[in-house]
Image (spheres, rainbow, N blue to C red):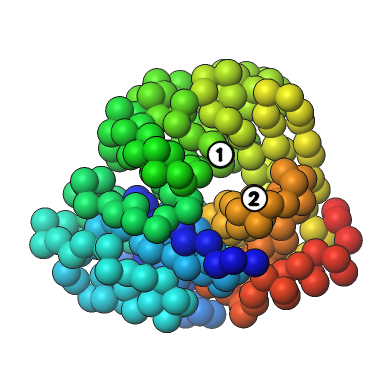
Amino acid sequence: MNRITVAAVGVHVLDIHVVGVQSIPDGSDGQLVDTIRFSPAGTAGGTALVLSRLGAAVRSYGAVGTDPLGDTLLAALAREGVDVSGLARTEAAQTSASVLPVRPNGDRPAWHCIGANAAFSLDGVSLDGVAHLHLGGPEFFGGDAAGELLARARAAGASTSVDVLAPGDPGMLEWIAAALPHTDYLLPNDEQVLGFTGATDLAAGARALVEAGAGCVAVTQGGKGALVVTADEIIEVPAFAIDVVDTTGCGDAFSAGFLLGRAEGRSLEASARLGCAAAAQVAQGLGTDAGAYDLAAVDAFASATPAR
């Protein structure tokens, strides 16, 4: 495989996982937990990390604060081989971060600070040598600005993808609608598809997003796997049978595997299978950077592991 160069643009987050949370202590009481761990995340940052592990040359573009959280996020991404020179440092806001208290049964509520993600402008994104542009969080820029960047990428010969961070809401779809005609691959989850479109059937909702302009909609469905919809076909790919530890970052990992598969020339079905296999690596550990794997290892896993 020729090494594909990807620009991962938009939302970069530092996740802070707290494992073994029984409850929120009363008053100023304390509580012992099993693990506290940091990991890079976000619809751009998490996807960048997994794409790099799978062999892509990845440049991240976004904004982080000048705080220690930003130092940690940059170092963690750089350690994974991601080019972080496009991540601007700003004193206007803290680095975006989430605290994820993981309960013993696996439930994972979250506290999130938008932070510097809201301060990033798309003006500084360089497309020199980029074969694919992945935009995570178009809602931060609006459909017009996001569409202009995606159109510029396509004019430069790159393919494009979009992953929305916000929950499904018809008003959000209206806000980003201008970006969809310039989007080769839209990568939502099932709740977003149903919420954006008001559909009660997932395939119908995905087809509505194709009719709104997206070339292909690849939907994650949690433990059910993925659904890929184009104007001509509907493909279902099941998830793999694994022992799930934490699902944080699985959607971003699916995006990375799916996009890498398409860049390699794999079919939509094979690419979705690679996406599900990448998500399974993440789900078996804690955080988007869980485990250690490369493309060959993920392909071997996919060949050897049964579907649910």
Q: Is residue 93 above or below residue 189?
A: below
**Image coords of residue 256 (percent x, y):** 57, 57
How crowded pointer 2 is (Cα within 10 Å; few <14, some 14-19, many 20+) is rated as some
**Disc 1 element:** strand
Q: In this rendering, does residue 288 appear at all?
A: no
Q: How many marks?
A: 2
State the quadrant of the N terminus.
bottom right
**Disc 2 element:** helix
Q: Is residue 81 above or below residue 95?
A: below
Q: Residue at x 52, y 23 (%)?
A: 213
Q: Is residue 28 left or right of residue 291?
A: left
Q: Is residue 248 left or right of residue 48?
A: right
Identify the amino acid type marked 1.
Answer: Tyr
Which residue is identified by label 2?
A: 262
State the quadrant of the C terminus.
bottom right
Q: In this rendering, does residue 119 appear at all?
A: yes
Q: Splitting the image into 4 quarters, where does residue 274 fall?
A: bottom right
* Disc marking residue 57: none
Identify the amino acid type marked 2.
Answer: Arg
Which residue is identified by label 1?
A: 185
Depth check: 154 or 112 in front?
154
Quick check: marks 2 and 1 in contact, CB under 8 Å?
yes
Q: Residue at x 58, y 30 (%)?
A: 215
Give how far apart the Cα atoms at labels 2 and 1 are: 10 Å
**Image coords of residue 209 (percent x, y):** 56, 24
Q: Residue at x 50, y 58 (%)?
A: 47
